């Protein structure tokens, strides 16, 4: 017995860890310095992983969107409303399709400005403007069928705004913009995996420059984002428009009479408040083309939507289809005017705005 006990005492004891409670007990028996060291190592590893992910996201052109970033241009315009005679609110169709300088050429001494966010219901921007003490004499609202005729707080409207109203779309370098655009298009269901892979392969193999995937945008001091499409962009615009049409036909639904009734009630209340504050509210629908135009006419038929607004606000609406000069534009992607056509449309818009003075 004594030899046995002596032999066993010379062997270090083995601790069997059977469960989490046992592991915790072992952890408590570690010296404080060892526990602190383990905690610091875990913290360092976590920070390293977070930093690595951040570097990767920044490398592809992404930066976390914020409400302040998205509304920066609009907020700047709102703060300067005392120097604006006409405020034009809308989405990217207005930012790309309306040149304020061309509008001002025919405004006879008055000054117009635009405030826009991609894929955004202009009523959201109107509410932002109405929060200010001073309003311009005239506010013109863009009617973008896919969002304007939907409830402001609907899930589809918010999802579109979250996905598309990101500063990376206009601020990232062209190469990073191209990569992020494909990732967002795929995530949002606006591009198929095959289309994204095909574009990536073309870039990797050097068959075309990545920047050529996207239009050449030129930002002017007035805020106008001029579209100067490249040959490669014209090719991919057809692909994008075809895919968008396929997605719309599977996800979109026809507007209901109840939805339009609620919208008209909202517009009437907003108009009444604006009239009391000395502001005239106008509505305009900018041009669309190709399959985008077909989709808008299919799911938001004019008789059920636009014509009801025109009857509710007689003499205060401008529909591009009603005028030969603005109904024949060719839009490469179906949704945005190219530079010369944007300037031409802006002059026609300015002539219409001239009819409304307070």
Image (tube, helix red, strand yellow):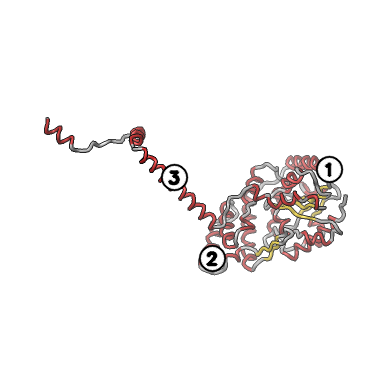
Earlier along the polypeptide chain: callout 2 or callout 1? 2
Secondary structure at badge 1 equals loop
Compared with 228, 92 (above or below) is above
Residue at 80%, 54% in the rendered image: 319
Q: Which residue is mark 2?
A: 203
Residue at 73%, 56% in the rendered image: 94
Q: Which residue is mark 3?
A: 43
Q: Find out whether the residues at labels 3 and 2 contact each other: C-beta distance under 8 Å.
A: no
Residue 145 visible in the current orientation: yes
The image shows residue 43 at horizontal and vertical percentages of 44, 45
Pair 3/1: label in front: 3
Q: Residues within 10 Å of mark 2 (few under 14, many from 20)?
A: some
Residue at 57%, 65% in the rendered image: 210
Secondary structure at badge 2 equals helix
Q: Residues within 10 Å of mark 1 (few under 14, many from 20)?
A: some
Q: Observer-nearest residue: 198 or 122?
A: 122
The image shows residue 259 at horizontal and vertical percentages of 73, 41
Pair 3/2: label in front: 3
Compared with 133, 92 (above or below) is below
Q: Which residue is mark 1?
A: 277
Compared with 307, 18 (above or below) is above
- Label 3 and label 1: CA atoms lie apart by 57 Å
The image shows residue 42 at horizontal and vertical percentages of 42, 44
């Amino acid at each position: 017995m004594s030899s046995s006990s002596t032999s066993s005492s010379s062997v270090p004891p083995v601790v069997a860890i059977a469960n989490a409670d046992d592991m915790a007990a072992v952890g408590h028996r570690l010296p404080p310095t060892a526990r602190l060291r383990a905690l610091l190592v875990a913290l360092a590893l976590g920070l390293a992983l977070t930093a690595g992910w951040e570097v990767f996201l920044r490398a592809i052109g992404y930066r976390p969107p914020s409400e302040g970033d998205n509304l920066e241009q609009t907020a700047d315009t709102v703060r300067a409303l005392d120097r604006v005679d006409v405020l034009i609110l809308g989405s990217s169709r207005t930012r790309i399709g309306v040149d304020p300088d061309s509008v001002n050429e025919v405004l006879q001494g008055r000054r117009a400005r635009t405030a826009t966010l991609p894929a955004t219901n202009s009523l959201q921007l109107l509410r932002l403007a109405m929060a200010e003490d001073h309003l311009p004499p005239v506010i013109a609202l863009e009617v973008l069928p896919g969002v304007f005729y939907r409830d402001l707080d609907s899930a589809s409207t918010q999802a579109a705004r979250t996905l598309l109203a990101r500063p990376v779309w206009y601020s990232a370098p062209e190469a990073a913009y191209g990569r992020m655009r494909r990732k967002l298009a795929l995530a949002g269901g606006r591009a198929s995996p095959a289309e994204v892979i095909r574009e990536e392969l073309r870039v990797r193999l050097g068959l075309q420059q990545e920047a050529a995937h996207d239009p050449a945008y030129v930002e002017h001091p007035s805020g106008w984002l001029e579209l100067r499409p490249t040959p490669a962009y014209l090719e991919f615009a057809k692909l994008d428009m075809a895919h968008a049409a396929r997605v719309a036909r599977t996800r979109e639904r026809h507007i209901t009479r109840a939805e339009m009734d609620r919208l008209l009630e909202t517009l009437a209340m907003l108009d009444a408040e604006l009239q009391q504050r000395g502001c005239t509210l106008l509505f305009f629908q900018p041009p669309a083309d190709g399959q985008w135009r077909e989709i808008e006419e299919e799911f938001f038929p004019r008789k059920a939507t636009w014509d009801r607004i025109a009857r509710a606000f007689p003499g205060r609406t401008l529909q591009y289809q009603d005028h030969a000069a603005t109904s024949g534009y060719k839009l490469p992607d179906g949704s945005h005017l190219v530079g010369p056509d944007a300037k031409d449309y802006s002059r026609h818009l300015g002539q219409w705005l001239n009819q409304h003075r307070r």
